[in-house]
Image (cartoon, rainbow, N blue to C red):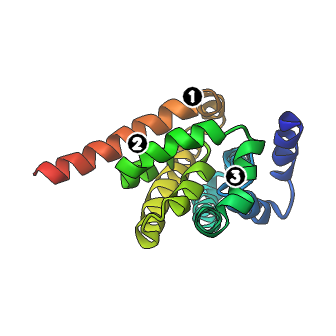
Amino acid sequence: MLHRLYARVLALAGSPRAPVWLAVIAFAESSVFPVPPDALLIPMALARPKRAWRLALICTLASVAGGALGYFIGYALFNQIAAPILKLYHYDAAFARFQETYARWGLWVILIKGLTPIPYKLVTIASGAARFDFALFMVASLATRGARFLLLAALLRAFGDPVRGFIERRLGLVTTLLAGGIIGGFLLLRWL
């Protein structure tokens, strides 16, 4: 089922309404949808490299807006909506471990997890469930999701089709290195 859904998302990349679909998928992925927007962003940016920045911006803003919905789900509707969603995707045990970590590391969790391919919906729902400061959540989400999608757009724009395979195989490595750079920068600023 997930492979068919992924194939359908890829087919949307060729649609004239692809930017709208990119926004819809980026929004939904941040709270309930299982396929990341990268599946649509990559072929769209490869097809029209001059639009890569615009597409990354659409993806970022829609993802952060969807993150607000995920936050609301965790904050107001956790037992009614979030718990069944987590159970559906078999994330319930992972979510329990995540909440323990979240109570201790809050902001760092948002910054790191928002960059990685780990489902962002976990971060958004957990932020609401943990009653994390909403304004700080939104700023951190904008920074981390923007960094992720703009990095992807930069790589696609600079290297084109050859980087597509690399990104699809090594997206976790690329985003982990970027997360390490951001964390290193914050730590450097803190101790200087």
Residue 127: image location, x then y, percent: 51, 59
The residue that appears at 65% across and 32% down in the rendered structure is: 168
Q: Are marks 1 and 2 in contact (CB under 8 Å)?
A: no
Report which residue position mark 3 lands on.
83
> Tag 2: residue type?
Ala
In this rendering, which labeled residue sits more in front, label 3 or label 1?
Answer: 3
> Tag 1: residue type?
Arg
Quadrant assignment, res 129: bottom right
Residue 29: image location, x then y, percent: 69, 54
Residue 57 sits above or below residue 155 on the image? below
- The residue furthest left is 192
Cα gap from disc 3 to disc 2, whole angstroms: 28 Å
In this rendering, which labeled residue sits more in front, label 3 or label 2?
Answer: 3
In this rendering, position of residue 65 left or right of residue 187: right
The residue that appears at 62% across and 61% down in the rendered structure is: 63
Indicate which disc residue 179 carries.
Answer: 2
Q: Judge by depth and name the residue closer to the eye, 154 or 149.
A: 149
Residue 92: image location, x then y, percent: 65, 41
Cα gap from disc 1 to disc 2, whole angstroms: 14 Å
Q: Element type at marker 1?
A: helix
Report which residue position mark 1 lands on.
170
Q: Quadrant of the N terminus?
A: top right
Cα gap from disc 3 to disc 1, whole angstroms: 31 Å
> Tag 3: residue type?
Ala
The residue that appears at 77% across and 66% down in the rendered structure is: 20
Q: Element type at marker 3?
A: helix
Quadrant assignment, res 162: top right
Residue 106 sits above or below residue 167 on the image? below
The residue that appears at 40% across and 51% down in the rendered structure is: 103
